[in-house]
Image (cartoon, rainbow, N blue to C red):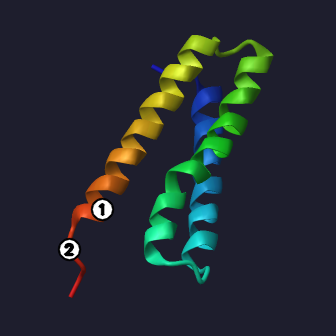
Amino acid sequence: MFSPAVLVVVAVAIIGWFATIRAIGTSKLSDTLKRWLLIPSWVPWMAVALGAPIFTGVLPIAEAMNIGGAITAGMAVAVVIAGRQGPRQ
């Protein structure tokens, strides 16, 4: 089980990522470019969210890498699956 500190910072990062997605979604970029920007927009939020527990010593670097990699892989799979679905009618 993850510590409460890790859960809080991951929640903050996900909220920040959703705000970034909203900004990307309302921009005038093409749909393909918007889809390609989803995962790279997550990486800075993940670094901010997991950096605080690492610096305070609550979270070892190896565990932070595992958490960040798992969340990023899950998001990448979701983006690929969403991109493979046909257009909505």
User: Which numbered circle lies on residue 82?
Assistant: 1
Q: Is 31 placed left or right of 18 in the picture?
A: left
Q: Give 32 or 6, whichever is nearer the viewer.
A: 32
Task: Please name the residue shown 57% across and 12% down the image.
Answer: 62
Task: Write down the quadrant of residue 71 in the picture.
Answer: top left
In percent of width and height, residue 49 lies at: 68, 36
Disc 2 designates what residue? 86
Q: Secondary structure at mark 1?
A: helix
In percent of width and height, residue 87 lies at: 24, 79
CB within 8 Å, label 2 to label 1: no
Q: Secondary structure at mark 2?
A: loop
Quadrant assignment for the N terminus: top left
Q: Give 79 or 50, whichever is nearer the viewer.
A: 79
In percent of width and height, residue 44 lies at: 68, 43
- Residue type for callout 2: Gly
Q: Is 82 placed left or right of 35 in the picture?
A: left
Task: Please name the residue shown 53% across and 30% down the image.
Answer: 68
Judge the density around disc 2: few (<14), some (14-19), many (≥20) Cα neighbours within 10 Å: few
Q: Is residue 20 above or below residue 57?
A: below
Judge the density around disc 1: few (<14), some (14-19), many (≥20) Cα neighbours within 10 Å: few
Task: Please name the residue shown 61% across and 42% down the image.
Answer: 43
- Residue type for callout 1: Ala
Q: Give 2 or 36, whichever is nearer the viewer.
A: 36
Q: Looking at this view, name the residue that lies furthest to the right.
A: 56
- Number of labels in the image equals 2
Q: Is residue 8 above or below residue 54?
A: below
Quadrant assignment for the C terminus: bottom left
